[in-house]
Amino acid sequence: MLLFRDEEHVSRWRRQWQMSPGAMLPLDVAWRLAQGWFDADRSAPEWRRPAVDKVEQLFTSLSLTGEYWQLR
């Protein structure tokens, strides 16, 4: 994840590094995504990666829709 000041900053960075567009989201949405993604103690021996269904529910709850956010 990279943080940028505005869309012009993103555009300059993409041109400099010849990167294709990804997804842009406001910092508050990124924070809620991180909270949902890392809600469990990943150092616990019983921790497992979230199932695709759970991740899709998280994306949907944050209105992260569209081709970029599709996992299947």
Image (cartoon, rainbow, N blue to C red):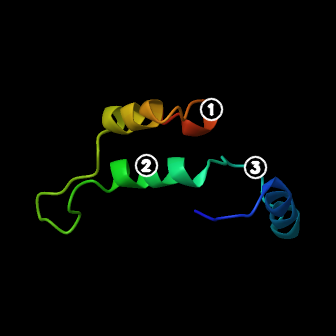
Quick one: quadrant of the N terminus? bottom right
- Earlier sequence position, callout 2 versus callout 1: 2
What secondary structure is found at the residue carrying circle 3? loop
Q: CA distance from mark 3 to mark 1?
A: 12 Å
Which residue is outermost to the left? 46
Of the residues tagged 2 and 1, which is closer to the observer?
Answer: 2
Q: Which residue is mark 2?
A: 32
- Earlier sequence position, callout 3 versus callout 2: 3
Task: Say few, some or many: other residues with alpha carbon within 10 Å of mark 1 (under 14 / 14 to 19 / 20 or more).
Answer: few
Q: Which residue is mark 1?
A: 67
Q: Amino acid at mark 3?
A: Pro
What secondary structure is found at the residue carrying circle 1? helix
In this rendering, the answer to whether 5 lies above or below 71 is below
In this rendering, the answer to whether 20 lies above or below 55 is below
Q: Amino acid at mark 1?
A: Glu
- Earlier sequence position, callout 3 versus callout 1: 3
Query: Which residue appears at 46% of the width and 55% of the height?
Result: 31
What secondary structure is found at the residue carrying circle 2? helix
Q: Quadrant of residue 14?
A: bottom right
Q: CA distance from mark 2 to mark 1?
A: 20 Å
Q: Along the horizontal axis of the image, is 54 left or right of 62?
A: left
Task: Say few, some or many: other residues with alpha carbon within 10 Å of mark 2 (under 14 / 14 to 19 / 20 or more).
Answer: some
Q: CA distance from mark 3 to mark 2?
A: 22 Å
Query: Which residue appears at 67% of the width and 48% of the height?
Result: 24
In this rendering, the answer to whether 58 lies above or below 2 is above
